[in-house]
Image (cartoon, rainbow, N blue to C red):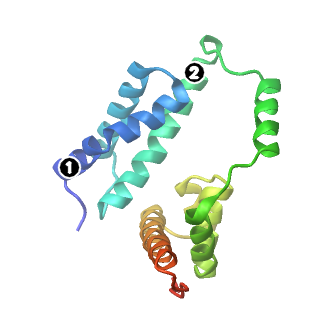
Amino acid sequence: MPLDHETILRHLFEARPRLSGAAWLIVRDAAAAEDLFQNVALKSVTKNVSFEHEGALLSWAMVSIKREAIDWLRKRRPETLGLEPEVLDLISGEWSAHPQPEGRRMEALRECLASVPEQSRQLLHLRYFEGHSCDEVADRVGAKVDAVYQRLSRLHRQLRQCVDARLQQSSLGFSPSSDLG
């Protein structure tokens, strides 16, 4: 059963700091980030979209607020001051030259991802490695957008549980053998 408008708004306002923060990271303007959050909240109850659970809603909201922020930034590009491409290249080169240690959590995630079924791995790759929106992923795999949100939400939950289990097992000295298939 889809979430009702009151539940949608309650979940969004609980996630407000995270959503506004994501917008702020792009626009670097607190007032604009708040306006963008409000736009997304309004769209969540006025557009013809439905959400089966909180995970689907929050995934949609995060994608929507990032898109709104990018659109806001594009409209104001002459007003904004960003880093020059040369500076970004220097930063990128510095990060590449001095990689950060990944730690046990990244290793556990890598192991868990290896056990994800191919179809699910394709969704994750399209969404996070190629950077496609959920709409684009849905088009590419021939599924409805809601189904993609639900699958990704389920994968996030499964991966989190797998990583937590592997970390707990490694801290106890056990060899992890859980599988997501």
User: How many dots with numbers?
Assistant: 2
Q: Which amino acid does label 1 sit on?
A: His
Q: Where is residue 2 in the image (x, y as percent from the top left)?
A: 25, 63
Residue situated in front as seen by the camera: 172 or 64: 172
Q: In which quarter of the image is residue 47?
A: top left
Camera-side residue of 14 and 146 = 14
Residue at far top of view: 79
**Between 37 and 108, the one nearer to me in the picture:** 108
Give the image location of residue 102, x and y in percent.
65, 58
Q: Do the residues labelled 2 and 1 touch (CB within 8 Å)?
A: no
Residue 35 drawn above or below residue 2: above
Q: How far apart are marks 2 and 1 (CA)?
A: 30 Å
Q: In this view, does 122 lie to the left or right of 48?
A: right
Q: Which residue is drawn at 31% across and 57% down?
A: 50
How crowded is the residue under tag 1: few (<14 C-alpha within 10 Å), some, or many (20+)? some
Task: Report whether 115 appears left or right of 166.
Answer: right
Label drawn at residue 5? 1
The numbered dot on residue 75 is 2
Q: Is mark 1 on a helix, strand or loop?
A: helix
Residue 22 x/y as whole percent? 47, 37
Q: In this view, does 29 lie above or below 118?
A: above
- The image quadrant where one finds the N terminus is bottom left
Given the current orientation, which residue lies at the most extreme left position? 6
Res. 59 mark: none
The structure residue drawn at horizontal position 40% and vertical position 30%, both measured from the top left corner, is 36
Q: In the picture, residue 80 is in which quadrant? A: top right
